[in-house]
Image (cartoon, rainbow, N blue to C red):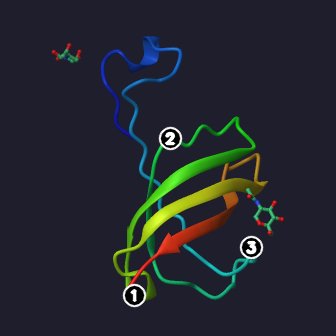
Amino acid sequence: MAKANTTNASPTLLGEVVVIYDPLTDGPELLSKMASTLTVMGRNLVPLKVRELSIIGGTGAFHRARGYGLKQTYSIATATLNAIEHYNVTVIHY
Ligand SMILES: *[C@@H]1O[C@H](CO)[C@@H](O)[C@H](O)[C@H]1NC(C)=O
Ligand SMILES: *[C@@H]1O[C@H](CO)[C@@H](O)[C@H](O)[C@H]1NC(C)=O
């Protein structure tokens, strides 16, 4: 996480940048099959049930992916805050 000096004083946390690495799998179980990478960017406003994020790239089967994803928390471990997120994605790729 990185943030501007003024972020803590901002009610919207303006200036905060968070990088998340979520392994992309075809199901919510820990041993689900891994899929190709999608690069997602946008405002992930966690209190919202569904967040819309931009798909700005990808690798493997998702070369040059462009599109959007609807992200929803599937489950969260309250002790660690580790979450399983569900994405519905619509992408154009080559
Ligand atoms: C941000 O805070 C740091 C540490 O207090 C300070 O050195 C720096 O000058 C500040 N930057 C700005 C743009 O205010
Ligand atoms: C994603 O798609 C599934 C299956 O169509 C649907 O049940 C679910 O509500 C959708 N979730 C979001 C966040 O759009």
Residue behind label 3 places its C-beta within 8 angstroms of ligand 2: no
Q: Position of residue 19 (x, y in %)?
A: 42, 51
Q: CA distance from mark 2 to mark 1?
A: 25 Å
Q: Is residue 19 left or right of residue 28?
A: left
Say which residue appears at 64% left-offset and 56% top-offset.
Answer: 70
- In the rendered image of this protein, does residue 27 appear above or below residue 83? below
- In the rendered image of this protein, does residue 87 appear above or below residue 14? below
Q: CA distance from mark 3 to mark 1?
A: 21 Å
* Residue 60: image tag: 1
Q: Nearer the viewer, mark 2 or mark 3?
A: 2
Circles 2 and 3: CB atoms closer than 8 Å: no
Q: Quadrant of ligand 1?
A: top left
SS of the residue under disc 2: loop
Amino acid, disc 2: Arg
Q: Position of residue 64 (x, y in %)?
A: 34, 75
Q: Quadrant of residue 22?
A: bottom right
Say which residue appears at 60% left-offset and 67% top-offset.
Answer: 89
- Residue on which disc 3 sits: 28
Q: Residues within 10 Å of mark 2 (few under 14, many from 20)?
A: few
Say which residue appears at 46% left-offset and 14% top-offset.
Answer: 10
Amino acid, disc 1: Gly
